[in-house]
Image (cartoon, rainbow, N blue to C red):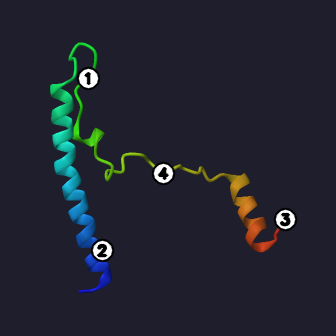
Amino acid sequence: MTLRQLFWMAEGRVKDNWQHTSAILALVANVNRDPKKTKAFKPSDFNPTLNTSRPDVIVVDKENVSLLRNLFTGDKR
């Protein structure tokens, strides 16, 4: 077994453990919430291993391309 495979196994176990923990946390939070004041919690609200945010998007336009061209080639077009 390689170190990479061992890392993947450990990462999978951590994600699985957080799925269980976040389900229990959502259950406890929903039992103790006021349904008239707050919405129901989902397990994903408590799971830190879920990547729900999108990375920042950079729009490529003529200005960006010219900056990159100048940076890498020294061309001043």
Q: Residue at x 54, y 49 (%)?
A: 57
**Three-letter amino acid code at the position of disc 4:** Pro
Label 4 crowd (10 A; few <14 / some 14-19 / many >=20) = few
Can you say which quadrant of the picture contains the C terminus? bottom right
- The Cα–Cα distance between marks 4 and 2, rounded to whole angstroms, is 24 Å
Furthest residue in direction right, as rendered = 76
* Comes first in the chain, label 2 or label 1: 2
* Residue 30: x %, y % from top left: 18, 28
Q: What number is the disc on residue 39?
A: 1
Distance Cα–Cα, label 1 vs label 3: 56 Å
Of labels 4 and 3, earlier in sequence is: 4
Residue under the point 59% across and 49% down: 59
Residue ID for mark 3? 76
- Cα–Cα gap, marks 4 and 3: 31 Å
Q: Crowding near pointer 3: few (<14 within 10 Å), some, many (20+)?
A: few
Decide: is 36 above or below 72. Answer: above
Q: Three-letter amino acid code at disc 3?
A: Lys
N-terminal-most mark, 4 or 2: 2
Q: Is residue 37 above or below residue 26?
A: above
